[in-house]
Image: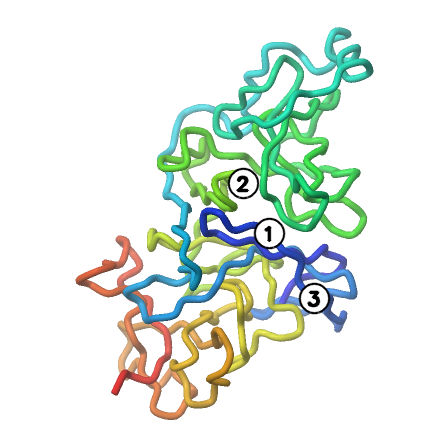
Amino acid sequence: MPGPSRARFALFVATGLTLAACPDKSDPTPTQTTTDAPGDSTGASAITTSVITSSASSGPGDTTQPASTSTTSTSSSTTSDDNSSAPASDTDPVCVTKMLHEQPPGPCDPFAQDCPECQKCNPYADDGGGSWNSDKCVFVVPDPDQVGEPCTAPGGGNDGNDSCDHGAMCWDVDAENNGTCVALCTGSPDNGVCADPEKTCAVYSGATLPLCVDRCDPLMSDCSRNDLCVANPTGLGFLCLLDASGDGGQVHSPCNYSNGCDPGLHCAEVTAAEECDQDQQGCCEPFCDLTIPNPDSQCPGVGQQCTPLFDPDTNPAPPGDEDVGYCAVPPP
């Protein structure tokens, strides 16, 4: 469950789908174990995808709607994550003058960062709503915050204007409009690149939101307190994404999004457990380790088995993830 005072959003990872708001949640006392503290009445930021409609051959996070996913794995480069190759210093008097007297142009390419001098290309909601669905040029503030540093987004997390440097955006923005700068991918939607080799490029919302996010191990739940480890929709490993579970997300609970379950759980098809509501889109079921003795003992549901998350024939497990399964009732 997410930490307190976070603006709750739902982000679709399929091309053509956008980011939507999630309902508010309550604010019990935080914990420090594998279950994170739920959000307060403002909720917690969340990446949202439609749940899978089949087993591991589809890969978690696949959409039930007729749209293709656009999350890509990354290669690493030798440049720094701050993408600070701006043609002019943002404290230069020219930039300050431009900020005061010029209006930034319209759409831009977040991968290419093709905005004019003193500006950067940032994702935003072009209708003022709760969904990142476009990109625009915005001015870079004087003395901008760097990747990994605290930041502010005066108009909210999906407004596009923030205090981060070129090639970065303010992410996980809370109700007070504070967040952390994260790098945007370079390269292209089909070959996203992150300068930090520990990051992977996750491309969302029709390639308008390319983020460099942490890799993770779903059997370890090793993401930060507000994040969940969920499968990359393309099947290329696992990513840390913002927790959207709120005060729900327990075992056998309904889920509509890949990050709608508590840490250690997978938003699976409803047929994965007899205890699931078969009228829902998805159901939260545990990840399990296929390599331990008696792996089915990890599964709490009636008749469940520790089932490979990846189909070796149609969707092979990425190197290092061959041990990852999830609890499901085998098909008849």
Q: Measured along the vertical axis of the image, is residue 71 above or below residue 242?
A: above
Asked if labels 2 and 1 touch by Cβ distance under 8 angstroms, the answer is: yes
Who is closer to the viewer here, 28 or 167?
A: 167
Who is closer to the viewer here, 163 or 322?
A: 163
Give the residue at x 67% y 58%: 21
Count of marks overlaid on the render: 3
Q: Measured along the vertical axis of the image, is residue 64 above or below residue 200?
A: below
Callout 1: SS: strand
Q: Amino acid at mark 2?
A: Leu
Whichever of labels 1 and 2 marks the residue nearer the N terminus, that label is 1
Task: Tell me residue 190's x, y (percent).
Answer: 36, 37
Give the residue at x 47% y 74%: 282
Question: Residue at label 3?
Answer: 23
Q: Answer left or right for 59 relative to 155.
A: left
Q: Answer left or right for 240 relative to 160.
A: left
**Residue 312 in sight:** yes
Neighbor class of circle 1 (other Cα within 10 Å; few <14, some 14-19, many 20+) is: many
Q: Measured along the vertical axis of the image, is residue 258 above or below residue 185?
A: below
Question: Residue at label 1?
Answer: 19
Task: Tell me residue 238's x, y (percent).
Answer: 41, 55
Question: Residue at label 2?
Answer: 209
CA separation in Å, label 2 and label 3: 22 Å
